[in-house]
Image: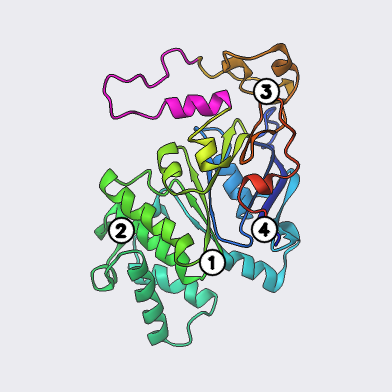
């Protein structure tokens, strides 16, 4: 079975910028079974631009995005409407998605009206209540309120409920727990995990937080300056990182031991330059070789379930990234 949503060698350059925001990225999600794909990277790695490309908000300057076997740019009429309903997003700051002058009820009613998914006011109310209960909210304590009367965690879960109302097949969750306190993170992460296990919805989980990615994702891709530097199962990528950049990210995760090093003391600072000159991470890499500064490394297989874009490894080039992101149809 072919992947449901797929990026093929996608490239995005803004204006006259020398360095692409996204450079030759391929990934896939959805297929024979639902899964959660984590897209991980620091600020400026291209996560937000990639998300906007997958949602169809931007048209790539190179490559293409496909949905349901058709190129996104060619979708028209009912097929375009189906894509807009079946691929939903949950953004970092839920407050920006609300109109502060309207009650929550209107935010939840509008998608049902726009896509004509309810035949009566009673049916609409029932669908809304079911969606709220699915994310752990009590309708009687939520409906009738304005956004400022709810906590950040409640607003985020309402956005998940809003996405569920449209019966999506894929949800892109962009930093969904970065603006809530630690006590609510587990609740929201559980809601996202249940999208896959209970409802069969695939999730693209976009984050800089390796710890939460490791908790809920099946597969992960690591971005650095617009390129994928490592991809595979989350156990391999985060549990056994091979690329020097991924290792740096993992070492930077705080440990429970207050005396433990975060691994940042000797890390070189980020530098800027053209990624086309070679590996973009080479100026920061303690193991960089002359070849790294001349050539851009392809994704090379580092094991049965992972690959890294690094000349330190002599594995075979990965022919298709679908197998590395859990959308190989098996």
- The percent coordinates of residue 136 (x first, y second) are 31, 64
C-alpha gap between disc 3 and disc 2? 42 Å
Residue at figure coordinates x 23%, y 69% from the top left: 141
Q: Earlier in the sequence, mark 1 or mark 4?
A: 1
Structural distance between the alpha carbons of marks 1 and 4: 19 Å
Residue sitting at x 40%, y 65%: 161
Q: Earlier in the sequence, mark 3 or mark 2?
A: 2
Instruction: Please name the residue that numbered disc 2 is placed on.
Output: 154
Q: CA distance from mark 1 to mark 2?
A: 21 Å
Question: Which mark lies nearer to you, 4 or 2?
Answer: 4
Asked whether residue 40 is in view, the answer is no
Residue holding disc 3:
279
Q: Residue at x 60, y 20 (%)?
A: 272
Q: Which quarter of the rendered picture does the C terminus lie within?
A: bottom right
Stretch in magenta: 243-267
Other-residue count near label 2 (Cα within 10 Å), few / some / many at <14 / 14–19 / ≥20: many
Whether 13 is among the magenta residues is no
Question: How crowded is the residue under tag 4: few (<14 C-alpha within 10 Å), some, or many (20+)?
Answer: some
Give how far across and how far down residue 276 sits, in percent. Answer: 73, 25
Label 1 sits on residue: 168
Q: Is residue 256 magenta?
A: yes
The local crowd at label 3, few if under 14, some if 14 to 19, many if 20 or more residues have their Cα within 10 Å, is many
* Residue 142 seen from this side: yes
Nearer mark to the viewer, of 1 and 4: 4
Circle 4 SS class: loop
Cβ–Cβ under 8 Å for marks 1 and 3: no
What is the CA distance from the residue labelled 1 to the residue labelled 3?
37 Å
Q: Residues within 10 Å of mark 1 (few under 14, many from 20)?
A: many
């Amino acid at each position: 079975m072919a992947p449901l949503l797929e990026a093929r060698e996608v490239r995005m350059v803004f204006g006259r910028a020398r360095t692409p925001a996204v450079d030759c990225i391929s990934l896939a999600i959805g297929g024979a079974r639902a899964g959660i794909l984590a897209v991980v990277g620091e600020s400026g790695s291209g996560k937000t631009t990639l998300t906007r490309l997958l949602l169809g908000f931007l048209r790539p300057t190179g490559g293409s995005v496909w949905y349901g076997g058709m190129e996104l740019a060619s979708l028209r009429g009912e097929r375009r409407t189906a894509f807009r309903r079946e691929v939903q997003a949950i953004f970092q700051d839920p407050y920006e998605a609300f109109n502060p002058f309207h009650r929550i009820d209107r935010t939840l009613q509008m998608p049902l009206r726009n896509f004509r998914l309810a035949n009566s006011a009673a049916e609409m109310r029932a669908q809304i209540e079911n969606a709220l209960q699915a994310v752990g909210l009590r309708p009687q304590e939520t409906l009738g309120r304005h956004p400022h009367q709810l906590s950040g965690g409640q607003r985020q879960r309402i956005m998940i409920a809003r996405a569920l109302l449209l019966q999506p097949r894929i949800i892109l969750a962009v930093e969904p727990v970065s603006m809530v306190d630690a006590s609510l993170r587990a609740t929201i992460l559980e809601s996202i995990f249940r999208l896959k296990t209970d409802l069969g919805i695939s999730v693209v989980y976009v984050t800089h937080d390796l710890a939460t990615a490791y908790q809920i994702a099946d597969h992960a891709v690591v971005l650095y300056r617009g390129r994928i530097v490592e991809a595979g199962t989350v156990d391999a990528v985060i549990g056994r990182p091979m690329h020097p950049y991924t290792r740096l990210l993992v070492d930077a995760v705080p440990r429970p031991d207050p005396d433990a090093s975060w691994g940042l003391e000797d890390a070189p600072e980020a530098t800027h330059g053209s990624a086309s000159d070679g590996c973009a991470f080479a100026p920061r890499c303690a193991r960089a070789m002359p070849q790294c500064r001349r050539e851009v490394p392809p994704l090379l297989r580092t094991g049965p379930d992972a690959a890294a874009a690094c000349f330190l490894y002599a594995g075979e080039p990965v022919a298709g990234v679908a197998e590395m992101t859990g959308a190989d149809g098996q």
